[in-house]
Each structure stands twice: as structure tokens, then as C-alpha cells.
């Protein structure tokens, strides 16, 4: 009995693990899935995935059909003599067939893959004379993203706004190590490399308004998994209005507490963070529209208590990031409360 139980333990474990993997493969959200494409680039990649899956299923079914036929046709029956079936190695026709078929299948995959690769890397529309396409210079940092809108005097971080139905070209670079820019629902991924001579370009185009989550897809340090950002697709009219709002900057503070926090920010934070829309990328993220965001550091809840905890000890939440801690010896609880109040009031959009 024991030997029978042991015999089935390993297959049972593998079956459970396989079922678990299948279930987990279905987990995800619409705005972070390449299986629900919402843009031209993502549609191309989805088509390639479907084509690959169809070919693999077809090959699998053919192999299973041949395998089943051989098992049934040539199985040894009761009373059969011990004979060796006719061997087919060296059969020229068969050798040609099973050599040509894989080549044809590879060509079916290769042709659209190469064609889409060139289309995704095509920047002729951006470089055309009189082009009105928006261009964003994206710089990856450890572990956050900076977005500078070329010719618009607007710089922001973590939230990338784009107009729907239009191509937005992004020039990708890194301030430190290799990262990878990936917005699964609207585009494939592209590496961001250190150095001005290694700039990669890709375009974003969203078919629908919405918020699409982006990830770093290249392991870059202990908080790689937390290097998130958002692409916010709005109508062209809303996008132009957002640019105007960003140029004007955040409104005046509404309370004495926030006003005190503004002074603390100028003393302790302004050397790394800017609150001017046109300020170039600095040591830390641009905070012009910090109050309009929905996440702190790209992944934390956007509320006052969480913000205060983040300022006190950023390493607790995002190990390896470059923001220093601000213990009570540097900023008192009262000053920290005022600073958080000020940051949450940095809004450029009307509520």
C-alpha cells in the first residue's frame, strides 16, 4: 500500500503545481496586460502571439495524430510474431518533408516578426518636416521615471500623459544602469541605456482613454519590482489643457500649515526636487503635480500618513533608492506634518 502511495505522490505534486501555474497565469488587470491590447504597438505584438500559438497548436495536433496512428496501427497484437517493422530512416521523401515543413513554419513567423520590428522602430513620422507629433524624453533612474516633453517646457515624473489616437515618440535613456520601459497594454518593451549615445526610441499610441500601468522590465536592483509608472491617455483637448495647467504650475497653498510646509520644502527638499513644470530632470522626481497623483513612489497609497512614513524612511519601502531618510532629529513631527500637507496640495488640475 505504501509503495502505491509513494508511486502517485510525485505525479500528484506536479499536477497540483501545473494547475496552480495555469490558474495564476490568468491573474492580472486589464491595464497591465498584453493580452488585452489598447494600442497599435500592443496589437502588433498580440497578433504575433496569436500566430505563434496557432502554429504551436497545429504542430502539436499533427504530432499527436501521427503518434496515435502509429500506436494503434502498429501495436503488437496477440498472436503476432516477434518481427521488426519496416524501417524508414534514410527515406529521401520523408527527410525532405520534415525538413521543409519547419523551415516554412519559421518563415511564417519570421516575416511578420521582422516587418513589425521595423514598424515599431520607425521614426520617420517624428522626423518629417512640419511634424506635430509629441516627443517625450524619458530618463530612467533608480527607481523612478522622469518625463520631459520636448518643446513644451513641461517636465513631470511617474505619470506620463499622452493624447489618444496620436503617436507620441519617447526617447529612452538611463541616468544610471540599464532599465527597460514597458507599457504592456499599449506597447512592447524597450531598454533604456546609460549615456547620450545609446538612446532608443519607441512610440506610444492609445486607442482608448484610460490609465495604463508601466513597469521596468529589466532587473536593475533591489527595488526593480517597485519601479512602476502610469501612462494616462486623455483626449487631445484634455491633453492640451493639461499642458497649459502644468506650465502654470500648482496653485497657492490653502492653509497656514501648508505654507509652513513650503518653507520646510525650500530648506530640505528643493535641492533635489523641483516644483516647476519646465525644470529639467534632477536628482529626484519633479513634484509639480504631486497632489494629482494616485500613488506615492509609484506604488504606495497616496495619503498623508503614508507620505510621512515614506519621507521618514524611504529605504523601508523601496530598498536601494537614492532618497535620504529624514529622522526626527532633522525634521520634527510637526514640520513633517506641514511638509506632507504642502506636498499633497501641489495640484495643477481642478478637482
Image: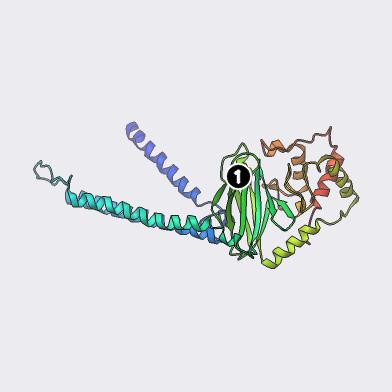
Residue 244 falls in image quadrant: bottom right
Residue for point 59% across, 58% down: 204
* Crowd rating for badge 1 (residues with CA inside 10 Å; few <14, some 14–19, many 20+): few
Answer left or right for 274 relative to 321: right
Which residue reaches farthest front?
129
188 lies above or below 3: below
Q: Would you name the residue on which mark 1 appears?
A: 197
Answer left or right for 314 relative to 43: right
* Residue 283, horizontal then vertical, whole percent: 73, 41
Answer left or right for 204 relative to 258: left
* Residue 145, horizontal then vertical, whole percent: 67, 47
Q: Which element is circle 1 on?
A: loop
* Residue 245, horizontal then vertical, whole percent: 77, 60
Residue for point 55% across, 53% down: 184
* Residue 349, horizontal then vertical, whole percent: 77, 60
Q: Which of 96 and 233 is in front in this view?
A: 96
Amino acid at each position: 500500500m505504501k509503495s502505491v502511495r509513494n508511486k502517485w505522490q510525485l505525479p500528484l505534486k506536479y499536477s497540483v503545481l501545473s494547475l496552480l501555474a495555469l490558474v495564476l497565469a490568468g491573474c492580472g488587470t486589464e491595464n497591465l496586460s498584453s493580452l488585452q491590447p489598447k494600442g497599435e504597438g500592443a496589437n502588433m505584438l498580440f497578433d504575433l502571439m496569436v500566430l505563434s500559438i496557432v502554429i504551436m497548436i497545429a504542430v502539436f495536433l499533427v504530432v499527436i495524430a501521427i503518434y496515435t496512428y502509429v500506436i494503434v496501427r502498429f501495436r503488437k497484437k496477440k498472436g503476432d510474431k516477434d518481427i521488426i517493422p519496416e524501417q524508414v530512416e534514410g527515406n529521401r521523401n520523408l527527410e525532405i518533408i520534415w525538413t521543409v515543413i519547419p523551415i516554412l513554419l519559421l518563415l511564417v513567423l519570421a516575416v511578420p516578426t521582422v516587418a513589425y520590428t521595423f514598424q515599431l522602430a520607425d521614426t520617420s513620422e517624428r522626423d518629417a518636416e512640419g511634424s506635430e507629433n509629441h516627443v517625450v524624453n524619458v530618463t530612467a533612474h533608480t527607481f523612478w521615471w522622469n518625463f520631459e516633453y520636448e518643446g513644451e517646457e513641461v517636465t513631470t515624473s511617474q505619470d506620463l500623459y499622452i493624447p489618444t489616437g496620436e503617436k507620441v515618440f519617447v526617447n529612452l535613456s538611463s541616468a544610471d544602469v540599464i532599465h527597460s520601459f514597458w507599457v504592456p497594454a499599449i506597447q512592447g518593451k524597450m531598454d533604456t541605456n546609460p549615456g547620450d549615445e545609446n538612446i532608443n526610441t519607441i512610440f506610444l499610441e492609445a486607442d482608448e482613454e484610460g490609465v495604463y500601468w508601466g513597469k521596468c522590465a529589466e532587473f536593475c536592483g533591489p527595488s526593480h519590482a517597485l519601479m512602476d509608472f502610469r501612462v494616462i491617455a486623455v483626449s487631445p483637448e484634455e491633453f492640451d489643457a493639461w499642458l497649459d495647467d502644468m506650465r502654470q504650475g500648482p496653485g497657492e497653498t490653502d492653509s497656514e500649515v501648508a505654507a509652513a510646509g513650503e518653507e520646510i520644502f525650500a530648506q530640505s527638499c528643493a535641492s533635489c526636487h523641483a516644483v516647476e513644470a519646465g525644470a529639467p530632470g534632477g536628482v529626484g522626481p519633479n513634484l509639480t503635480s504631486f497632489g494629482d497623483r494616485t500613488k506615492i513612489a509609484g506604488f504606495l497609497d497616496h495619503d498623508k500618513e503614508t507620505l510621512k512614513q515614506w519621507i521618514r524612511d524611504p529605504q523601508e519601502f523601496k530598498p536601494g533608492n537614492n532618497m535620504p531618510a529624514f529622522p526626527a532629529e532633522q525634521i520634527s513631527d510637526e514640520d513633517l506634518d506641514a511638509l506632507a500637507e504642502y506636498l499633497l496640495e501641489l495640484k495643477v488640475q481642478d478637482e
